[in-house]
Image (cartoon, grey):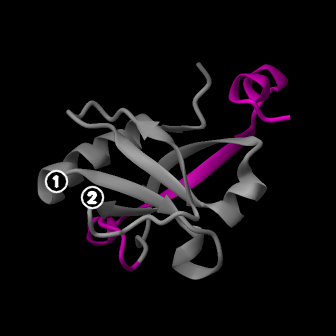
Amino acid sequence: MTERVAATDAAASLLRQLTTQHGPLMFHQSGGCCDGSAPMCYPVGMFVTGPSDVLLGTIDAGLDDPIEVYMSESQFEYWKYTHLTIDVVPGRGAGFSVEGPTGMRFLIRSRMLSEPELADLGVG
């Protein structure tokens, strides 16, 4: 089964630490400028998804509950042909994202999905 989203080991490690502090987490990637161009990590319930958000998939970070990853529908139109990997690097996190005070920030690394992966996902 083809997955649209994954996380690096470093990101999964930080997600485990943040889950201990904040409880279950989720990501939202909205697009746009400034903080909106970074994947934002929130405690579940702190960001309410709506009908214009697409569930890309889940990240298994070795936690009891997988971490759901959402993207705005308009942004998804640009990214539907890509696989996204959430990574973490040193730097200042986005203003409302829970990693902000850690001195690390989440970012997206992407690659084009292969033709077999696209077919598996039903994308033509």
Amino acid carrying mark 1 in the image: Gly
| Marking on residue 23 | 1
Q: How far from the left and from the top, in percent, is residue 102?
A: 27, 65
Q: Are marks 2 and 1 in contact (CB under 8 Å)?
A: yes
* Res. 72 image quadrant: bottom right
Relative to 26, does residue 13 appear above or below in the rendering? above
Disc with the residue nearer the chain's start (2 vs 1)? 1
> Magenta residues?
95-124
Q: Is residue 79 visible?
A: yes
* Res. 92 image quadrant: bottom left
Quadrant location of the N terminus in the rendered image: top right
Amino acid carrying mark 2 in the image: Val
Foreground of the two, 13 or 45? 45
Relative to 79, does residue 33 appear above or below in the rendering? below
Q: How far from the left and from the top, in percent, is residue 2?
A: 62, 24
Q: Residue at x 29, y 53 (%)?
A: 25
Foreground of the two, 99 or 114? 114
Lateral position of residue 103 relative to residue 56, left or right:
left
Under tag 2, what secondary structure? loop
The tally of labels here is 2
Q: Residue at x 27, y 30 (%)?
A: 62
Give the labeled residue for mark 2: 44
Q: Residue at x 35, y 44 (%)?
A: 67
Could you tell me how far apart the alpha carbons at marks 2 and 1 are, in whole angstroms?
Answer: 8 Å
